[in-house]
Image: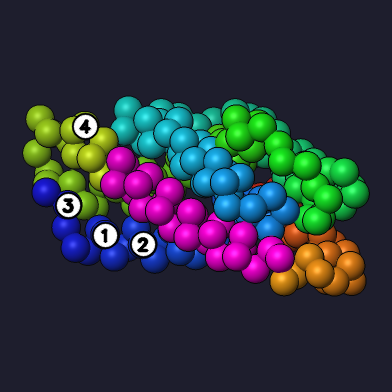
Amino acid sequence: MISVQFLLTAIVVVIAPGTGVIYTIATGLGQGRRASIWAALGCTFGIVPHLAAATFGLAAVLHASALLFQIVKFAGVAYLLYLAWQALKSDGALSVSAENAHQNGMRIAQRGALINILNPKLSVFFLALLPPFLSGNPATATAEMVLLGSTFMALTFAVFVLYGFFAAAARTHLLESERVVLWLNRGFAAIFAGLAARLAMERA
């Protein structure tokens, strides 16, 4: 049974703007509603490895191993900097432009998944978030973790799709001004670079 407290906590966590939200909004602005759905789907499935790690206790291993944590962390930092560069390039994958060609949905989803997969803090986050909402019965702990994790993923997808749809709705109006487009791309690049810097400062 999923408690109201868990649902409220999960909604607050999902709504808070993070890397996945920024990626989905950038995709929605750059390529429209359909692309934003793929972005939301990718970000959602990028959570799966971390939920699995939390469920089977692997997150504790990641948290305890400084070397493993640093490897995953700096791979994530490098990827976020790559996304910042893609936002700045006129023909980049995240560049907002009226002439931007629609990209393959699977490629969009793949980028979204990598954003979350390469964030080692997510495993530790789920290890801290889910256990307080378990019944305390060891026999059903795994099933309960899976249920809570699946619910969190469903909420993530729904909220991210809404973010993407709002961005796609604003796309036509924003892309009418070349100045706005320029600053949007610079803004997204700065945000991804800032998120990379914040991730680089994280400790296991």
Amino acid type at image mark 4: Thr
- Looking at the rendered structure, the secondary structure element under dot 3 is loop
Q: Position of residue 15 (x, y in %)?
A: 46, 64
Disc 3 or 2, which lies upstream in sequence? 3
**Vertical placement of residue 123 versus 190, above or below:** above
Q: Earlier in the sequence, mark 3 or mark 4?
A: 3
Residue 165 visible in rendering? yes
Question: Which residue in the structure is indicated by mark 1?
Answer: 7
Q: Which residue sits at x=40%, y=53%? A: 158
What span is colored magenta in the figure? 149-172
Label 2 Cα crowd, 10 Å radius (few <14 / some 14-19 / many 20+): some
Query: Magenta segment: does it hold 2?
Result: no
Kindly identify which residue carries mark 4: 142
How crowded pointer 3 is (Cα within 10 Å; few <14, some 14-19, many 20+) is rated as: few
In the image, residue 171 lies at what x, y percent? 69, 63
Spatial CA distance of label 3 from label 2 is: 13 Å
Residue 200 vs residue 163: left or right? Answer: right
Which element type, helix, strand or loop, lies under badge 2?
helix
Residue at the image point whose x is 18% and y is 47% from the top = 134
On the image, the x and y values in percent for residue 169 come to: 60, 65
First along the sequence among labels 2 and 4 = 2
Circle 2: residue type:
Ile
Residue of label 3: 2
Mark 1: amino acid: Leu
Q: Circles 2 and 1: CB distance less than 8 Å? A: yes
